[in-house]
Amino acid sequence: MAPARAAATGPRWWRRLRRVDPHRGLPATVGGTAVALVVLAVVGSLLGPQWAPTPLTDPLEVAATGTTVTGAPPTAGYATTQRVVDVVLDGATVRAQVTAPVGAGDDLPGVVFVHGAGTGRFVQAFRAQAEAMARAGVVAMVPDKRLDTYTLRHRDYEAMAADYARSVAVLRDQPEVDPARVGVYGESEGAWIAPVMAARDPGLAFVALVSAPVVPPLQQAAFAADSYLRNTGVPQQVFRAIPRAVGLSLPGGGFEYARFDVTPFQRRTTQPLFVAYGTGDASMPLVQGAQRIIADAAVAGNVDVTVRYYAGASHGLRVHGEVSADFLRDLTGWVAGLPATAGSAPRIAGAQPVQTYLAGPVPQPRWLRDGTVVLGTVAAGAVLLLLAPAAVGVDRALDPWRRRRAARHGTAPVLRRFAAGIRDPLLVLALATVLTVAALVWYLTSVAQLALDYERNALVVQGGWVLVRVVGLVAVVAGVLLVRRVRALRRAGQRAAPGAVRAGALSLVVVAAAVLLVVLAYWGVFQLGI
C-alpha cells in the first residue's frame, strides 16, 4: 500500500501521469515515445531527398598573386560627363545614363552594364564601375532594368538579352563611340544574360562576367544555401531542408527560369572574356565558375579568357562596402587595352580561391513537392488543432444553460466530459504541435536571415534548433500518453470522449497532429541520423 500512497501524494506532474496511465506509468511512456520518434525519423527520411553535395576534387591554382593585367595602358584620368538617353524596347521605354570621358576624342570603346538581381535603376547601380570606365576613356551606359516583365516568379533571360541588345544599339549610335568596340558587363544574374547577348551578336567586342553563377539558378540557390548554412554553423539535420525547400513548387506557379542553362550560350561566345570573382563571395562557385567558363569558351575556339580573383571581396567585388579599387583598375585597363590585353598572361591570377563542394543537380522531393498542398495542409492542420479545444470550451460554456433548462423540466442535466486522463494530453498535443510548427518557421526564417547576412549567432542557430526539437518532443510525448489512455479506456469498455463535440475534437486533434508531425519530420525536426 505504501507505493500507492506515494503515487497519490507525489508531485502534481507525477499524479497526472499516473492518472493517464495508472498501470505502467513512466517506463511504458518512455518506450512508446522512443518508438514514435524512430517511426517519425524513418518516415521523414523516406519522404524526401537527402543532401550530400559532391566535394570539389579539381582545385584551380592561380599563376600569380598580382592581378594587374599585362599590357594595360596607364589610367588616363579623364574628367567625365553624364547624360540620360531613352532606350525604346518592344512595348516599353527605359532610360539609360551615359557616362563619357571629356576630351578623349572619338571612336572610343563602350560598355553596356547588365543588372544583377539586386539592382534596377541607373541612379543606384554600377556608379563606381561606370565612372572608372569613363575616366579610362571608355564610354559607359547603365540602362534601367525593364521591370514590367521582371518579377520574382517570372523572368525570361533570353527576352532580357534582347532588351539589353537595344541598349547596345543605342550606345553604338553615340557620337564618340566606335560601334565595333562596344562590349557588355554582366554581374551576378546579369552573367546569365550577357552570354546570350554575346552568342547572338558576334559583333560585340568583349564580355566581362563578374560574380558569375554559371550553373542554373536552382543549382546556384542550393549551393549558396549550403555555403551560407555551413558558415552560420547550423546543426547537420538542417541541411536536409535544402533540397526540400529548393525543390518545393511555390503556390501560384512560375519560377521556370530557375532551370535556365547558360552553357549553350557560353559555348558560342567568341569574344574576349574578363572573369572576376571575390574570394569572400560565399554565394558563387568561385573555382567551378572559372573552370566552366574557360571550358565552354574553348568549345567555341576561344582562348582569350582572363580570370582574376580579389582577396576578401564579396559578391559584386566589394570590400568593406566599396567596389574593389584593384578590380576597377584591372577591368578598365583590360577594356581600354583591347585587343592587346585579350590574351594577356597570366590567364588566372590573384588570391587563391577555395570551393569545397560542387554546385550541381539538386535532388528533387518525391512526395511533399507541391508547395500549395504543403502550405494548405499545414495551415488547415494548425487551424483544426486550435479550433478543436475552442469548440470544447464553447460546449462547456453552455453547461449553465443546460442546468437551468434541466431544472425547468425537472430532469437531470446531461453534461459531457472527457474520461479521466484524456483532456490534459489532448490539449498539450494540440498546443505543442502548433507551437512546433511556429517555432520551425521562426527558426528557418531566422537562420535564412543570418545566412544572407553571413553572420553567426549560436543562441539562435544551436539554441533555436534545440528549442524546436524540445517542443516537438513534448508533442510526441503528449500523443503517446493520449493514445495509451484511449486504448486503456477501450479495453475497460469506456468511452474516451462522450458526445459529438468531444468525440469530434478528439478525432480532429489526433488526425491533424499526426499529419503535422509527419510534415515536421519531413523537415528534420525528429531526425535521428537516419
Image (cartoon, rainbow, N blue to C red):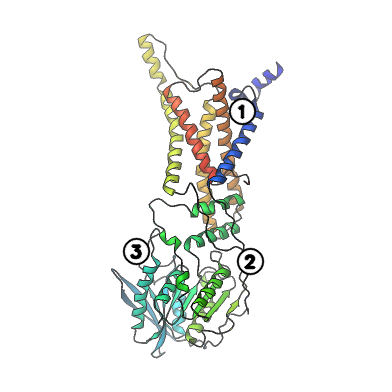
Can you say whether 45 is above or below 166 in the image?
A: above
Q: Say which residue appears at 58% left-offset and 27% top-offset.
A: 484
Mark number, residue 149: 3
Measured Cα–Cα span from mark 3 to mark 1: 61 Å
Query: In the image, residue 248 lies at what x, y percent?
Result: 46, 52
Question: Quick one: 132 or 157, which is closer to the camera?
Answer: 157
The residue positioned farthest toward the right in the image shown: 2
Mark 2 or 3, closer to the camera: 2
Query: In the image, residue 384 lies at what x, y percent?
Result: 44, 35
Q: Secondary structure at mark 1?
A: helix
Res. 235 visible in picture: no
Mark 1 or 2, closer to the camera: 2
Residue 388, image quadrant:
top left
Query: Can you identify the residue that label 2 sits on?
Result: 57
In the figure, is residue 83 to the left or right of 301?
A: left
Query: In the image, residue 475 lies at what x, y percent?
Result: 55, 36
- In the rendered view of the protein, which quadrant contains the N terminus? top right
Q: Say which residue appears at 62% left-offset and 32% top-offset.
A: 32
User: Which numbered disc, 1 or 2, marks the residue that appears first in the sequence?
Assistant: 1
Q: Amino acid at mark 1?
A: Trp
Res. 336 visible in picture: yes
